[in-house]
Image (tube, rainbow, N blue to C red):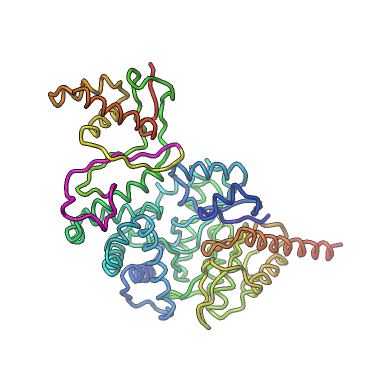
């Protein structure tokens, strides 16, 4: 199952054309809830044709601020209305000192943050009456770290008992920016918790820094890391192609989705062969 | 709260840096890369404000716009979890603080209101309307489109390019704005009298005759034939444009 992030940039061509054939679409609830008019109608048409996965932006699970229960209730209603398959969010914070920042800031890798975030994920899961998938975000600087990144992430997954959204590109970007082996990092993650995979392109802005822009095509080493991840998994996991900027012709996006699918197929065959 | 004060403080320092550019000590950070966060956050906010207020952003000198965006984001704590709604807070921030930029550019408040109205109407949740497409303009009760906003301006921002508006244009202008069934937002220039008629209709569906009666009573005037003709013509047009959604026949 390969899906695509649904964007207003290509909504019209997506609905009228045949260039893109995703198995599902993903949206941020924040961009589609509580709206009407033209976009609501477009969205309703898309929902008739594709299952919906959701990927939130503003929950701010790692924030020192209180959880916004009013917002969460709206998300819950949106998930129900749209019959969403899952709700995922970022392991980061986007609100602090009572102000939304509309970006994903890195949480300090500390034990108290592990406890805090885990408790909040559990609260959210209770309220939504479903497990949520938490995404490892790309980050450009550590913030007062006491734990390693892998310790931080694994402790939260364990304590919160939530699912993992494994963004393979993010791990690649982080491995490059923070000088570690991305494949070895993925090997240390609890594969049984992986509920959803993200794949995307990035931009290398200097010899020492990659930015997670979602504005370029996926590069070969990230495809290789994807194949490596699939070999570690014992089941089929939905995969999403993220493209937020610099949107190319839709056939090019379909070609990326096709490549993801063929990698999936070849790994599946590899495994069948190994078991037979 | 399971978070220690120290961790909270570091998180707050990072957020504060993103908003203001002032960086208080955070152990272990990468001093070069941390700038990316400030740049990213600023870009998101500037992009969003520019796309909500393209006319205002072009109307103000570049540095002034940039300074305003920076000031707004560093001083104002954005409340909306939905980024598309955040530009409303920008408009409110300037208005509530009686910001000097509004006096320096007297057209600006109207321009911001005009542009925000377009976004608000374009995005607003659908409002159900109970009416029939068939009826008689003169005798049936008219039903106003609930997806509308009535506006008053000091400058004709809905009729003229902001750059061409001068102090000589200062006056009292009114407009009705609404969303049609295709989702388009339409602005209609109105006289004060016509706005009053629309306000009557916003209260409840009424016939043309009832509207005229109420108008005549309120203003202690008798509408002559020309004036009645003019109002009927306006209502006819409003029906075509879907500012009036239809008729209530019972
Ligand atoms: Fe992602």
Quadrant of the rendered structure where residue A2 is?
bottom right
Q: Name the residue nearer the viewer: A66 or A42.
A: A42
Locate residue B112, reporting x and y percent: 28, 53
**Residue at (26% x, 37% y) in the render:** B190
- Position of A256 with respect to A77 (left or right) is right
The quadrant in which the C terminus of chain A is found is bottom right
Q: How many marks?
A: 0
Identify the magenta region.
B157-181
Image quarter for ligand 1: bottom right
**Residue at (34% x, 32% y) in the render:** B238
Quadrant of the rendered structure where residue B185 is?
top left
**Residue at (66% x, 52% y) in the render:** A21
**Residue at (41% x, 26% y) in the render:** B130
Going by the picture, which residue comes out furthest to the right? A276
On whether residue B160 falls in the magenta region, the answer is yes
Q: Name the residue nearer the viewer: A267 or B156.
A: B156
Locate residue A6, reporting x and y percent: 55, 53
Locate residue A160, reporting x and y percent: 53, 58
């Amino acid at each position: 199952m390969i899906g695509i992030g649904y964007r207003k940039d290509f909504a019209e061509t997506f609905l009228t054309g045949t260039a893109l054939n995703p198995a599902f679409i993903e949206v941020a609830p924040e961009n589609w809830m509580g709206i009407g008019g033209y976009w609501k109608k477009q969205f309703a048409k898309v929902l008739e044709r594709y299952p919906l996965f959701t990927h939130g932006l503003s929950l701010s699970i790692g924030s020192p601020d209180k959880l916004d229960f009013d917002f969460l209730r709206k998300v819950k209603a949106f998930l129900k209305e749209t019959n969403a398959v899952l709700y995922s969010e970022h392991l980061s914070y986007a609100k602090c000192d009572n102000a939304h920042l509309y970006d994903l800031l890195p949480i300090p890798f500390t034990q108290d943050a592990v406890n805090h975030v885990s408790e909040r994920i559990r609260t959210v899961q209770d309220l939504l009456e479903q497990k949520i998938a938490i995404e490892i975000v790309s980050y450009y600087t550590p913030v007062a770290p006491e734990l390693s990144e892998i310790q931080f992430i694994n402790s939260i997954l364990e304590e919160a008992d939530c699912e993992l959204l494994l963004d393979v590109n993010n791990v690649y970007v982080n491995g490059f920016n923070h000088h570690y082996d991305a494949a070895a990092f993925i090997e240390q993650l609890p594969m049984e918790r992986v509920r959803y995979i993200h794949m995307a392109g990035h931009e290398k802005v200097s010899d020492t820094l990659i930015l997670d822009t979602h504005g370029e095509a996926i590069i070969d080493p990230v495809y290789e890391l994807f194949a490596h991840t699939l070999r570690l998994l014992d089941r089929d996991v939905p995969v999403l192609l993220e493209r937020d900027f610099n949107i190319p012709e839709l056939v090019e996006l379909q070609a990326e989705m096709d490549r993801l699918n063929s990698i999936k197929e070849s790994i599946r065959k590899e495994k069948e062969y190994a078991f037979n | 709260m399971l978070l220690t004060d120290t961790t909270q403080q570091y998180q707050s320092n990072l957020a504060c840096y993103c908003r203001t550019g002032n960086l208080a000590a955070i152990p272990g950070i990468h001093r070069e890369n941390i700038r990316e966060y400030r740049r990213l956050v600023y870009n998101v906010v500037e992009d969003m404000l520019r796309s909500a207020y393209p006319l205002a952003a072009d109307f103000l000198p570049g540095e002034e716009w940039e300074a305003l965006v920076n000031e707004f984001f560093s001083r104002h704590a954005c409340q909306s979890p939905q980024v598309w709604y955040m530009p409303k807070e920008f408009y409110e921030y300037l208005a509530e603080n009686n910001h000097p930029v509004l006096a320096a550019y007297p057209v600006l408040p109207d321009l911001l209101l005009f542009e925000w109205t377009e976004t608000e109407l374009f995005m607003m949740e659908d409002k159900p309307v109970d009416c029939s497409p068939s009826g008689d303009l003169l005798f049936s009760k008219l039903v106003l489109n609930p997806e509308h906003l009535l506006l008053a301006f000091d400058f004709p921002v809905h009729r003229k390019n902001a750059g061409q508006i001068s102090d000589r244009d200062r006056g009292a202008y009114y407009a009705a704005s609404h969303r049609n069934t295709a989702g388009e937002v339409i602005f209609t220039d109105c006289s004060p009298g016509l706005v009053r008629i629309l306000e009557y209709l916003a209260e409840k569906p009424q016939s043309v005759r009832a509207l005229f009666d109420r108008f005549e009573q309120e203003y202690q005037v008798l509408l002559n034939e020309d004036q009645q003709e003019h109002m009927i013509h306006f209502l006819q047009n409003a029906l075509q444009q879907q500012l009036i959604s239809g008729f209530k026949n019972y």
